Amino acid sequence: DSGVTQTPKHLITATGQRVTLRCSPRSGDLSVYWYQQSLDQGLQFLIQYYNGEERAKGNILERFSAQQFPDLHSELNLSSLELGDSALYFCASRGQGENEQFFGPGTRLTVL
Amino acid sequence: GEDVEQSLFLSVREGDSSVINCTYTDSSSTYLYWYKQEPGAGLQLLTYIFSNMDMKQDQRLTVLLNKKDKHLSLRIADTQTGDSAIYFCAENPGANNLFFGTGTRLTVIP
């Protein structure tokens, strides 16, 4: 158990809809990262937050957004969903001065 | 840009050693990582190596780094059926976020 939690575990929705994925980092970790794992794109970095502020952006679509709250949990919002957004979405957290990222169990999103 | 390559599949017999290889492109990566993903599960950090090291050993795991050739390998000694999983190498080219390889699916034959 990495100490990173994600909810929900599974999410099934329809095209055009909007969903919110939630991540709670390990206790005290200020950095949260979001990654997408899909069959055709592999594991891709989406976005990083550090103590509430956006720190780095990867291959994140404009339809996707994220935020980190004062209690350090983070949410990834996916809107106008398309079939190709079906994927596993992972969040990871990292402690200050640490080199490792610890991953949550992921949220499996299926868009029908 | 970053490009991390791995072969897709590896099969070994139980008790043999497994060697999973990875090549990366960004020489500025400070650390290189190995993660394990079991079916239906998240990514488990196995080990990582600092870029100025050549080798790191951790129980059954040995990581070798050839910085000149930008080649990283993970050796698993005495491979067990529980080692069957997908193994990802990853680099972090100074930006803290990770760039992952395609993953190598290791199948251990009893």
Image (cartoon, coloured by chain):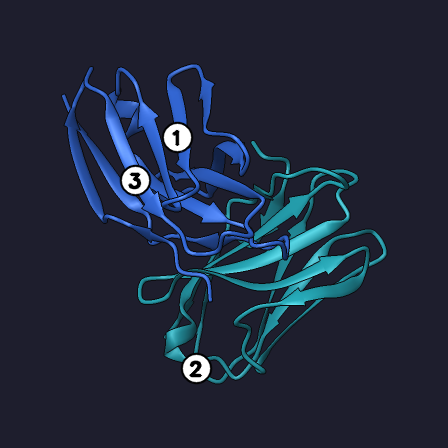
Residue B8: give x, y in percent of width and height: 23, 49
Tell me residue A50's x, y (percent): 76, 56
Q: Colour of chain A?
A: cyan
Q: Secondary structure at mark 1?
A: strand
Q: Are marks 2 and 1 in contact (CB under 8 Å)?
A: no
Q: Is residue A5 above or below residue A22?
A: above
Q: Amino acid at mark 1?
A: Leu
Q: Residue furthest right?
A: A70
Judged left or right of residue A96, residue B106 is left
User: Could you give the CA–CA distance between mark 1 and mark 3, rounded to whole angstroms?
Assistant: 9 Å
Q: Residue at x 56, y 31 (%)?
A: A1
What residue does disc 2 label?
A15
Residue A41 rendering spot, x and y as whole percentages: 37, 66
Residue identified by numbered label 3: B21
For the colour blue, the matching chain is: B
Residue B67: quarter of image: top left
Secondary structure beneath disc 2? loop
Viewer-side residue, A44 vs A14: A44
- Residue B4 sits in which quadrant? bottom left
In whole angstroms, how far apart are the C-alphas of marks 2 and 1?
A: 45 Å
